[in-house]
Image (cartoon, rainbow, N blue to C red):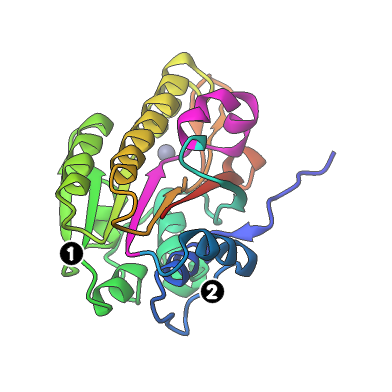
């Protein structure tokens, strides 16, 4: 049977977030997926004034297909699960640059595993132009801290996925930020070391799904004060290698197909 790649490019991510927040979209951006941001806007009942963007690195769609129950904490706070296709190459800097610039790799220039600071316009720049207060919280040496460096936003680095979650919770509880973008790679690390479906890797899926739940719960306690957009948005998947490890970067369906979850609190 032929591989069936998902329809939607990751380049729509920035447009979806911008549309939900009613930010002016730079012309360079791929447009939002109309039906999707339409539904989200309907559920928000107006422009989102908060967004929590959670990026669990390397969680492929087939992990969801085979271990659906692990995503229960994500389902709890989201209403739409939408299939996306990763970038070529299916590695973190290429995929996240595409998500946050609305451009294909040839447009933003990161086409392989390199991490230069992006000079082109990103969702972060659009948010800052609109006067939004933005934070990035990420595990040490995260791609986010390299390619999105040098902006007038707050960067927080933590040693582990759990510490990232603690810092993110603290920021959300302080209610000082309009947008918090979070990157953890506990699953990516464990899947590389032990294989994408190893016990260690699946435990990491749960750890990150639970983290998403805790962040969403914090926002739900403020229901009525804000209109909040929530996303759980991986960048690519991983496939099992001959020697029992995990890898990605290829066009294999395991690397390419991913699932994003969207939720609203209003
Ligand atoms: Zn990786």
Q: Is residue 171 above or below residue 45?
A: above
Which residue of the protein is positioned furthest toward the top in this rendering? Answer: 199
Residue 186, image quadrant: top left
Q: Nearer the viewer, residue 42 or 241?
A: 42
Which portion, as a residue range, is magenta?
Answer: 49-74
Ranked by sequence position, the earlier of labels 2 and 1 is 2
What residue sits 24% from the left and 70% below the top? 132
Q: Which residue is more in the foreground, 230 or 124?
A: 230
259 in the magenta segment: no
Ligand 1 placement by image quarter: top left
Separation (CA) of disc 2 from disc 1: 24 Å
Q: Nearer the viewer, residue 214 or 128?
A: 214
Mark 1, ligand 1, within 8 Å: the answer is no
Q: Where residue 61 sits: x, y (%)?
A: 60, 38
Q: Which residue is mark 1?
A: 153
Place residue 168 in its image quadrant: top left
Residue at 52% from the left image edge and 68% from the top image edge: 104
In this rendering, does residue 17 appear at all? yes
Q: Is residue 138 left or right of residue 104?
A: left
Residue 250 shows in this picture: no
Q: Split into 4 quadrants, where in the image is the N terminus? A: top right
Q: Position of residue 49 (x, y in %)?
A: 32, 64
Element type where label 1 sits in the image = loop
For residue 180, above or below residue 161: below
Observer-nearest residue: 251 or 82? Answer: 82
Q: Residue under circle 2?
A: 30
Left or right: 31 as drawn, with respect to 131: right
């Amino acid at each position: 049977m032929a591989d069936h790649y998902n329809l939607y490019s990751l380049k729509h991510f920035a447009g979806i977030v911008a549309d939900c927040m009613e930010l002016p979209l730079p012309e360079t951006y791929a447009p939002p997926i109309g039906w999707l941001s339409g539904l989200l806007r309907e559920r928000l009942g107006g422009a989102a004034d908060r967004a929590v963007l959670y990026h669990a690195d390397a969680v492929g769609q087939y992990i969801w297909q085979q271990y659906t129950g692990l995503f229960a904490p994500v389902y709890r706070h989201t209403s739409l699960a939408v299939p996306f296709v990763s970038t070529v190459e299916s590695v973190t800097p290429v995929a996240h640059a595409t998500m946050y610039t609305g451009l294909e790799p040839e447009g933003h220039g990161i086409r392989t595993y390199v991490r230069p600071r992006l000079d082109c316009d990103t969702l972060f720049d659009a948010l800052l132009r609109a006067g939004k207060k933005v934070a990035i919280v990420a595990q040490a040496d995260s791609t986010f801290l390299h390619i999105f460096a040098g902006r007038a936003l707050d960067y927080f680095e933590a040693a582990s996925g759990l510490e990232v979650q603690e810092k993110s919770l603290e920021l959300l509880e302080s209610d000082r930020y309009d947008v918090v973008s979070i990157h953890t790679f506990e699953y990516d690390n464990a899947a590389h070391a032990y294989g994408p479906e190893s016990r260690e890797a699946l435990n990491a899926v749960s750890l990150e799904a639970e983290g998403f739940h805790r962040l969403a719960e914090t926002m739900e306690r403020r229901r009525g004060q804000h209109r909040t957009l929530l996303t759980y948005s991986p960048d690519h998947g991983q496939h099992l290698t001959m020697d029992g490890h995990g890898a990605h970067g290829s066009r294999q369906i395991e690397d390419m197909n991913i699932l994003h979850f969207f939720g609203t609190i209003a």
